[in-house]
Image (spheres, grey):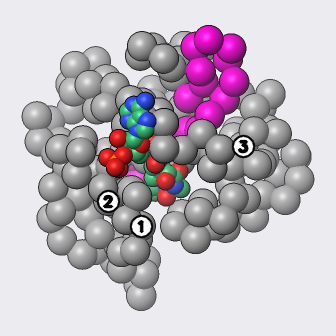
């Protein structure tokens, strides 16, 4: 199901059929370093992750991490979307792209449109983002999107993250 489109991209809901793509993405070095090990080792694990993570979020909130695919050929490039975590007071934006599709502006294009969706379609007044302190690519992108650093924050005890926010 398509959520919205940008000039080059389509953001659509993930389904269990995306398991191979998700298995690759969540096992890339940058994902493991900056987001964490989701324990996804097999296609079945990836299906379980999609069902319990993004698909459960669509059902509960009407949003979640979406699949970002290239309009021209439908190839999945990464994930971008919105999360509502019990540990944060507001919705946060998240994104991750396969290494071979980075540096082409896809992350900025999909994240900018996701913020537009949050503001105009969902009526949100504030969106957060969290990154690990050394995630310079993500921090740079958040700055370009207009999010401002607010404070250090412990999502889990002993695990400090940088908290960013934008207000509409
Ligand atoms: C964070 C992450 C999503 C950034 O992705 P990215 O592909 O580097 O982002 P973009 O391509 O949108 O932007 C990177 C650069 O490409 C440039 N670029 C290249 N071609 C472009 C084009 N055609 N159009 C627009 N920008 C282009 C951008 O200007 C930008 O350069 P800058 O940083 O010098 O301004 C990516 O590093 C990633 O997936 N990391 C692993 C997961 C992760 O850490 N996620 C965040 C968790 S908080």
Q: Position of residue 55 (x, y in %)?
A: 62, 34
Left or right: 73 in relation to 30:
right
Ligand 1 is within 8 Å of the C-beta of the residue at disc 3: no
Relative to 32, say whether 67 is above or below.
above
The residue mark sitting in front, 3 or 2, is 2
Asked if disc 2 and disc 1 are in contact, CB closer than 8 Å, the reply is: yes
Q: Position of residue 100 (x, y in %)?
A: 65, 44
* Stretch in magenta: 68-89
Residue corresponding to mark 1: 135
Residue at the spot 15% in from the left edge and 55% down from the top edge: 148
Residue corresponding to mark 2: 139
The residue mark sitting in front, 1 or 3, is 1
Relative to 12, say whether 46 is above or below.
below
Asked if disc 3 and disc 2 are in contact, CB closer than 8 Å, the reply is: no
Residue 25 vs residue 61, the one in the foreground: 25
Q: Please tell me whether residue 110 belongs to the stretch shown in magenta.
A: no
Q: Position of residue 107 (x, y in %)?
A: 44, 38
In what element is the residue under mark 1? Answer: loop
Q: Position of residue 104 (x, y in %)?
A: 48, 36
Extreme residue toward the bottom, this view = 158
Left or right: 125 in relation to 54:
left
Q: CA distance from mark 2 to mark 1?
A: 6 Å
Residue at the spot 60% in from the left edge and 24% down from the top edge: 69
**Can residue 48 be seen in this snapshot?**
no
Residue at the spot 72% in from the left edge and 43% down from the top edge: 22
Residue corresponding to mark 3: 22
Q: CA distance from mark 1 to mark 3?
A: 21 Å
Task: Mark 1: give few (<14), some (14-19) or many (20+) Cα within 10 Å.
Answer: some
Residue at the spot 31% in from the left edge and 31% down from the top edge: 112
Q: How many marks?
A: 3
Ligand 1 is within 8 Å of the C-beta of the residue at disc 1: yes
Task: Mark 3: give few (<14), some (14-19) or many (20+) Cα within 10 Å.
Answer: many
């Amino acid at each position: 199901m398509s959520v919205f489109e940008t000039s080059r991209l389509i953001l659509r809901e993930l389904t269990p059929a995306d398991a191979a793509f998700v298995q690759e993405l969540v096992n890339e070095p940058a994902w493991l370093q900056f987001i964490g090990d989701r324990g996804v080792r097999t296609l079945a694990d990836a299906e379980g992750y999609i069902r319990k993570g993004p698909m459960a979020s669509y059902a509960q909130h009407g949003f979640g991490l979406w699949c970002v695919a290239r309009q021209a050929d439908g190839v999945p490039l990464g994930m971008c979307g919105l999360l509502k975590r019990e540990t944060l007071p507001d919705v946060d934006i998240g994104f991750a792209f396969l290494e071979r599709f980075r540096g082409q502006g896809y992350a900025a294009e999909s994240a900018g449109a996701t913020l537009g969706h949050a503001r105009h379609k969902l009526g949100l007044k504030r969106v957060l983002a969290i990154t690990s302190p050394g995630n310079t690519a993500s921090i740079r992108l958040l700055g370009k999107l207009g999010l401002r650093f607010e404070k250090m924050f412990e999502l889990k005890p002993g695990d400090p993250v940088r908290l960013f926010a934008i207000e509409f």
